[in-house]
Amino acid sequence: MIKKLFLPIDNSPLIVFRIFFGLLLALETIGAILTGWVKENLIDPKFTFSYIGMEWLQPLPGYGMYFYFLTMGILGILIMLGWKYRFTLGAFTLLWTGSYLMQKSSYNNHYYLLILVCIIMLFLPANRYASLDAKNNPAIKTGVMPQWCSWVLIFQVAIVYFFAAISKFYIGWIDGSFIKLLFESSPFYYKVDFLFSQRWFQMFIVWSGIAFDLLIVPFLLWKRTRTIAFFSSLVFHLFNAIFLQIGIFPFFALSFVVFFYPPEKIRSWFFKNKEKVLNPQPITANTSVLLYFFLPYFIIQLALPLRHHFIKGDVLWTEEGHRLSWRMMLRQRSGTLQFRVIDKHTNTLVPYNYMKSLTGKQISFVQTKPDGIWQMAQQMKREFQENGLDVAIYADCETMINGGHSKKLIDPTVDLASAEWNHIFHNNWILLYDDNEKLLK
């Protein structure tokens, strides 16, 4: 089995994927400018909610973020063309990771997946054919690659789908309550409400979503079901692209299909004039990459979606262990929040309207996410310290999930200005409830 990883195969799937990938990176970043995403999330806010520990990472002033994303768009085109491949891809990876870490209120799983695939692609010989690098340096040109180059990307996408399916086995998905809310929030709802409002259709989406996530990779791997799986994937992702409007992710997910078809088939479709290269000898160059990078990398990828099982409380409620775990489109959170700010010296209430300094999306993030509430309290603490005030900050917060019962999320007796953030385990100031919604002490 291990020997098969190093067998030479035609590199057409990887080359085609590089071209698609570079184009999608360019469309994502340029599109972020044209659709107003950059303005809404990185220019309009007075400050952004970066990942905890990365608060120093803030958007460039003025219109700097437009140039930032324009630079990424140009890098995407260069990746597509295969010009100085590892430099341009490395630069894009750093810039994209920076934009991802500097704002959390617009978290999206495909932003995270882009980082992971960029990192994987840095280790793959995707510029060895149909690239400016191969044209400028014919010595690197080749029509083959070791088979593991395809399998690392197949394994990555399999992890995404598998954990996306497993996370759906909870009551809010199974009973269709989240899907109902998701459809009602769609801008197309009133145009197709004759379908979206039907209980049978909502339940069809519930179970077909689980079935698709569980079976799509095995069915693509099996020759007899591959074509059916491909057209099912096409319908599934186009439906999401049209009605849920989730950016490039549907097309990004479809681009992985090239790795499931025989490499010779991909060559015949995209590179008709490419010579078939016979190279029966295993390709053992850079085998240490598999052992020292990809083995620990995939161990981490398998561990991250499981970490919430080792954290006290329900991840759906606490959000601890939610991100980086492929828990995609599972719930709708809503809530109310008021901060009580107390001057420690005078023990008097200090008025503060936190919403005046936030955008609408940031308000939603702060009102419903425990880390958003804590980070807002830390931001308020810094502002008061700049004015020479030492304050205690308490949160009166109630949250509901999928339109259910509203419950207190944060312990109102805990001073969040002094509370520490636990990166690994449960933060005790997030309140927990039993199955009967009784508060746990």
Image (cartoon, helix red, strand yellow):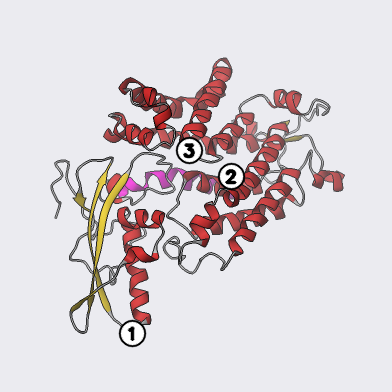
Name the image quarter holding the C terminus.
bottom left
Name the image quarter holding the N terminus.
top right
Mark 1 lies on residue? 388
Mark 3 lies on residue? 160
Pointer 3: residues within 10 angstroms few (<14), some, or many (20+)? many
In-image side of 418 versus 408 (left or right) = right
Mark 2 lies on residue? 117
- Element carrying mark 3: helix
Q: CA distance from mark 3 to mark 1?
A: 48 Å
Q: CA distance from mark 2 to mark 1?
A: 46 Å
Instruction: Name the kind of residue labelled 3 in the image.
Output: Val
Residue visible at 51% across and 66% down? Answer: 57
Task: Give the number of the disc on residue 335.
Answer: none
Q: Is residue 7 above or below residue 311?
A: above
Select label 2 or label 1 by which is in front.
1
Q: Which residues are magenta?
A: 293-310
Instruction: Name the kind of residue labelled 1 in the image.
Output: Gly
Q: Earlier in the sequence, mark 2 or mark 1?
A: 2
Q: Earlier in the sequence, mark 2 or mark 3?
A: 2
Q: Earlier in the sequence, mark 3 or mark 1?
A: 3
Select label 3 or label 1 by which is in front.
1
Residue 99 coordinates in the image, percent (x, y)? 54, 57
